[in-house]
Image (spheres, helix red, strand yellow):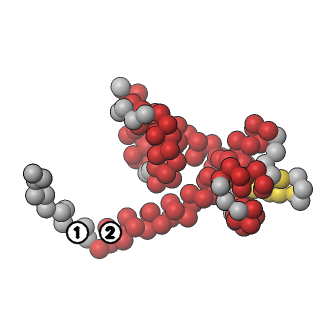
Amino acid sequence: MAANISPDPLPAEPTQAQRFEKTRAAQSSATLEDYAELIDDLLTGTGSARPTDIARRLGVSHATVIKTIGRLKREGLATSVPYHGVSLTEAGRKLAADTRERHRVVVELLTAIGVPRETAEEDAEGIEHYISAVTLAAFRAFLQHS
């Protein structure tokens, strides 16, 4: 028989609005972070990051990749030359490195508490975009002391 658990009271409206705004902002930047990280991986691994390769690895259409590359360029995160693929600016490389580091910490924490590695990798793909700096620091502290 399940226990009857009452829901938590609603937070104050400004608090709740701030929480939802944080989530919307993270959703908006998640795509750019994924692209920057993948482009950096492709450049490091194969020497080029072509839209066709990006589309295949992300499971999206070529048109979607072209649109997102345009967004990366507008944000100052990438450059491209026709027929030569995409490169990251210094800001784009920093974004990729920061995203990769958040992913690594989340995976380490999840595996430390018993989540299988493959599941931890999959879950970290989402968590890495939404985790706050405070929570990430707590994860690091926990990992250092465990």
Up-down: is 44 above or below 29? above
The amino acid type of the residue labelled 2 equals Gln
Look at mark 2 in the image and give the residue it sits on.
16
**In the image: residue 20, left or right of residue 101:** left
**In the image: residue 106, left or right of residue 99:** left
Q: Position of residue 96 (x, y in %)?
A: 64, 46
The amino acid type of the residue labelled 1 equals Leu
Look at mark 1 in the image and give the residue it sits on.
10
Please name the residue shown 18% across and 63% down the image.
Answer: 7
Q: Quadrant of residue 15?
A: bottom left
For the residues labelled 2 and 1, the Cα–Cα distance comes to: 8 Å
Q: Residue furthest top?
A: 146
**In the image: residue 54, left or right of residue 27:** right
Contact (Cβ within 8 Å) of mark 2 with mark 1? yes
Please name the residue shown 58% across and 42% down the image.
Answer: 100
Q: Residue furthest right?
A: 83
Q: Is residue 92 visible?
A: no
Q: Is residue 59 visible?
A: yes
Mark 1 is surrounded, within 10 Å at the Cα level, by few (under 14), some (14 to 19) or many (20 or more) other residues, namely few
Up-down: is 66 above or below 56? below
Judge by depth and name the residue closer to the eye, 55 or 92. Answer: 55
Secondary structure under badge 1?
Answer: loop
